[in-house]
């Protein structure tokens, strides 16, 4: 590897701390998934899905996967809620 | 079939599914004890073989390249499918975009300013992500989606006409075709030189992790980036047009 | 901690399937499908994780540092983006179904024939 580019950063997080973080985010994700399913009103469900997407991104970061975090953050928080809200607006406009 | 009966049948099926899943879980190594050989082998040899320090992108575009071609074409076909499904039926008409823009409720100043200020940096960020696949956590797919967000911001700022003008269907479809075809063409280029499909035939560069290193990985990532961005802009544009402009009943 | 992420995956899968089966609105069903898909991402990344390892990017760390599995990350990465496009196709179908049948209730859509 190129010594001119070497920036040595300390990566030592205590194992217990990493475990605690992962367990916390996993519990939040289980609760978030339940909330997304239990909410029946579609517009409120879309907001819950957006928050669930951000939680998923944090989980992927805790699993040492920054690439997947980048994808999930944009797709789950912006693109998917936008498509869903446009569909709901179209359906509601026709029902008027 | 009443809803209550459906619920009971589902609970019986789900109990069986979860039971089999937990039975299979007993034989798996626990979370954190990753034993498998492939991950370690690829981590060891990838930087030396391809001069790419982003091993995930090297796996995506080099070691597992033909799988990524298939996934990219799934994206391509899904965008084409949306265009076909949302085609104009005979019993519908389309309003003029100017009429719709005149009747649209005004967006607040805060939303407009923040959206328009952020558009430039987001385009730069997305372009940087799509072109640096081999160095850091970036790559074609992420960069493409971030580029889409810039277009979406322009629509959200209330500039519906500007959004339509900067993403005309013909141009977006042409860009998407260039992206998808470019990826396949890079693979065919390797065949033209007598190697296997999608072999890395461009010079690998001198330093691992430089911008112009790793041969075809950087090129493929760029093509994938513009293809993903164009596909999502096409999908969003179709849905926006369907929601705002298409009305039923011929006038 | 040895099996907890996989138990969470089973829970998310079961909850999402329950939402799909008992749904009364097509868009609610599609969002529950998104939740089911997210359980597979967690499963993929959970399989490849190694305790005490870092992300597989050797830009600024020595090449022999223990790192997590990059193959499952590559799978999950393309998964996320492609399934968003397939969801968009499903939403287009929902729009056309509403135009044709006037309702978005899946339990009523089953009974309409043509």
Image (spheres, coloured by chain):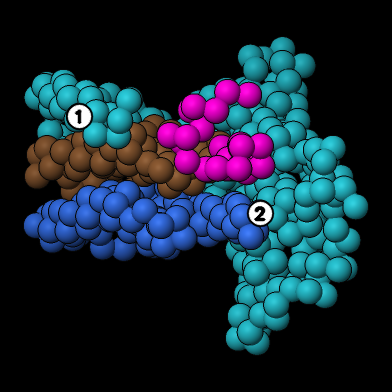
Chain colours: A blue, B cyan, C brown
| Residue C112 magenta | yes
Q: Mark on residue A94? A: 2
Would residue B21 be counted in the magenta stretch?
Answer: no
Residue B171, image x, y percentages: 85, 48
The residue under the point 28% across, 37% down is: C18
Q: Residue at x 73, y 51 (%)?
A: B242
The residue that disc 1 covers is B8
Indicate the chain on which mark 1 is placed.
B
Q: Looking at the image, is C15 positioned above or below residue A25?
A: above
In this view, the residue in front, A14 or C11, is C11
Observer-nearest residue: B40 or B159? B159
Q: Chain of mark 2?
A: A
Is residue B213 positioned above or below B237 on the image? above
At numbered mark 1, what does the secondary structure look like: helix, strand or loop?
A: helix
Q: Say which mark, if any, is on residue C12.
A: none
Give the quadrant of the N terminus of chain B: top left
- Seen from the viewer's position, the closer of residues B145 and C12 is C12
């Amino acid at each position: 590897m190129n010594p001119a580019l070497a920036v040595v950063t300390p990566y030592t997080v205590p194992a217990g701390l990493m475990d605690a973080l992962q367990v916390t985010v996993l519990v939040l994700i289980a609760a978030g998934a339940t909330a997304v399913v239990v909410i029946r009103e579609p517009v409120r469900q879309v907001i819950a899905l957006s928050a669930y997407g951000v939680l998923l991104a944090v989980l992927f970061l805790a699993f040492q996967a920054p690439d997947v975090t980048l994808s999930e953050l944009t797709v789950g928080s912006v693109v998917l809620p936008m498509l869903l809200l446009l569909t709901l607006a179209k359906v509601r406009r026709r029902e008027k | 079939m009443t809803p209550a009966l459906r619920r009971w049948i589902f609970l019986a099926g789900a109990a069986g599914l979860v039971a089999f899943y937990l039975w299979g879980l007993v034989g798996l190594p626990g979370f954190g004890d990753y034993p498998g050989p492939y991950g370690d082998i690829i981590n060891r040899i990838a930087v030396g073989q391809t001069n790419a320090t982003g091993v995930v992108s090297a796996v995506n575009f080099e070691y597992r390249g033909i799988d990524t071609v298939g996934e990219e074409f799934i994206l391509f076909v899904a965008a084409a499918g949306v265009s076909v499904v949302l085609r104009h039926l005979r019993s519908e008409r389309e309003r003029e975009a100017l009429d719709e823009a005149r009747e649209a409720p005004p967006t607040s100043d805060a939303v407009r300013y923040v959206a328009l200020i952020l558009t430039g940096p987001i385009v730069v960020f997305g372009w940087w992500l799509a072109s640096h696949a081999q160095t850091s956590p970036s790559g074609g797919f992420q960069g493409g989606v971030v580029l889409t967000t810039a277009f979406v911001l322009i629509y959200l700022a209330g500039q519906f006409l500007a959004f339509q003008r900067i993403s005309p269907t013909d141009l977006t479809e042409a860009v998407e075709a260039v992206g998808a075809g470019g990826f396949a063409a890079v693979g065919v280029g390797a065949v033209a030189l007598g190697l296997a499909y999608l072999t890395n035939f461009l010079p690998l560069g001198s330093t691992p992790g430089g911008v112009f290193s790793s041969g075809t990985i950087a090129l493929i990532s760029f093509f994938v980036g513009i293809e993903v961005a164009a596909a999502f802009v096409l999908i969003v544009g179709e849905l926006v047009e369907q929601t705002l402009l298409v009305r039923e009943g011929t006038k | 901690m040895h099996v907890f992420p996989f138990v969470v995956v089973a829970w998310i899968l079961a909850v999402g399937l329950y939402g799909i089966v008992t749904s009364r609105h097509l868009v609610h069903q599609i969002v529950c499908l998104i939740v089911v898909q997210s359980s597979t991402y967690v499963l993929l990344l959970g399989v490849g994780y190694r305790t005490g390892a870092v992300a597989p990017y050797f830009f600024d760390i020595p090449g022999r540092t223990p790192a997590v599995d990059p193959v499952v990350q590559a799978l999950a990465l393309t998964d996320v983006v492609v399934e968003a496009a397939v969801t968009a196709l499903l939403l287009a179908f929902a729009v056309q179904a509403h135009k044709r049948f006037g309702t978005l209730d899946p339990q009523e859509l089953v009974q309409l024939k043509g």
